[in-house]
Image: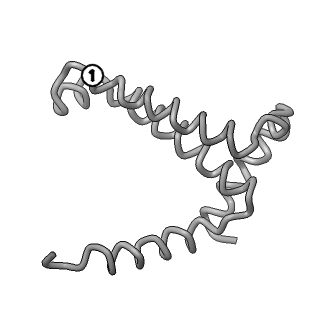
Amino acid sequence: MNKITELISVIHDFSEKRNWLKHHNGKDLALSIVLEAAELLENFQWISNEEAYEKNIANIKAELADILIYCFRFADEYDFDIEKIIVDKLKQNEKKYPIGK
C-alpha cells in the first residue's frame, strides 16, 4: 500500500466513523472542494501574496488540507487511482503545452 492509498483509507475511516459517507456523493464533494477553495482564496483578498503568507500561513495550510481531503474523498468515492489520473493528465499537458511553446 502506498502513502496516498494509506491516506485515503485514513480519510475514509474518519468519515465513516462520523456517518458522513452518506453525504459524500460526487455533487456534494465537488461543491465542498469549490467552497474550501474559496475559503483558501479569502486569505489573499485585498493584500499582497507576501502579506497573505506572513499573516495567514496557518489558515492557508488548513484550507489546503480541507481541499485535499475532499479531493481524496472524491477519488475514493469513485475508485479513481489518484496517481494514475495525475500522470495521465500530465501526459496530456505535455502534448498540449510542449516545452518551448
Q: Position of residue 19 (x, y in %)?
A: 86, 33
Quadrant into which the N terminus falls: bottom right
Q: Residue furthest top?
A: 46
- Residue drawn at x 41%, y 26% is 59
Instruction: Specify few, some or many for label 1: CA neighbours under 10 Å numbering under 14, 14-19, or 20 or more.
Output: few
Which residue is tagged 1? 45
Q: Quadrant of residue 29?
A: top right
Residue in view at x 16 percent, y 32 percent: 50
Q: Position of residue 49 (x, y in %)?
A: 19, 33
Q: Is residue 91 above or below residue 44?
A: below
Q: Is residue 52 above or below residue 68?
A: above
Camera-side residue of 76 and 35 = 35
Instruction: Give the residue type that dot 1 points to.
Output: Gln
Determine the residue positioned at 19% across, 21% down.
47
| Residue 20, image quadrant | top right
The answer to whether residue 14 is left or right of residue 53 is right
Number of numbered discs present?
1
- Quarter holding the C terminus? bottom left
In percent of width and height, residue 93 lies at 36, 72
Q: Nearer the viewer, residue 1 or 34?
A: 34
Of helix, strand and loop, which one carries label 1?
A: loop
Residue 89, position as x, y percentages in the image: 46, 71
